[in-house]
Image (cartoon, rainbow, N blue to C red):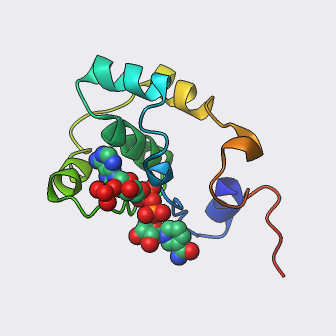
Amino acid sequence: MRRFHEQHGILTEAWSPLGQGAILDEPTILRIAEELGRTAAQVVLRWHVQLGNIVIPKSVTPARIEENFRIFDFELDEEHMRAIEGLDAGDGGRIGPDPVTFAVV
Ligand SMILES: NC(=O)c1ccc[n+]([C@@H]2O[C@H](COP(=O)([O-])OP(=O)(O)OC[C@H]3O[C@@H](n4cnc5c(N)ncnc54)[C@H](OP(=O)(O)O)[C@@H]3O)[C@@H](O)[C@H]2O)c1
């Protein structure tokens, strides 16, 4: 989908970029967060930004809103990016439609 967007000058926006909070205790995310001294949410948001996704995380918690902005002073390396990409759980782990099979009606 991102390839299609690139060809057509479209910016991709993440839908529920933190998985509505459900992926923040995922062991791979926690491992990377610990390695970098960051929070799980910061690691996930940074992954999106490095991929080129637009992120609009939602929080009603002021401290989390601030935390979610502090993602521009560190980087994930290739191994981190690949490890997070490898977490794609297919339909079983989705909270929204799969962009690969989503049908426009
Ligand atoms: N137009 C559409 O069809 C559509 C569909 C889906 C989503 N959206 C929009 O996209 C935005 C985000 O989506 P979303 O709300 O579904 O999911 P999301 O941003 O992935 O996750 C929000 C959840 O993560 C928690 N959270 C946020 N920052 C956190 C942090 N640093 N640490 C731990 N937990 C954190 C929030 O808790 P607290 O709030 O309790 O802090 C909330 O429970 C929203 O503005 C939503 O309206 C639009």
Residue 52 in sight in this render = yes
- Tell me residue 58's x, y (percent): 35, 63
The C terminus sits in image quarter: bottom right
Left/right placement of residue 1 relative to residue 44 reads right
Left/right placement of residue 53 relative to residue 37 reads right
User: Is 47 drawn above or below residue 94 in the view shown?
Assistant: above
Spot the residue most to the bottom.
105
The N terminus sits in image quarter: bottom right
Left/right placement of residue 16 relative to residue 2 reads left
Q: Quadrant of residue 103?
A: bottom right
- Viewer-side residue, 46 vs 102: 102
User: Is 30 drawn above or below residue 40 in the view shown?
Assistant: above
Residue 54 in sight in this render = no
Left/right placement of residue 78 relative to residue 70 reads right
The residue at 56%/27% (across/down) is 82
User: Is 59 drawn above or below residue 23 in the view shown?
Assistant: below
The residue at 50%/45% (across/down) is 51
Q: Quadrant of residue 10?
A: bottom right
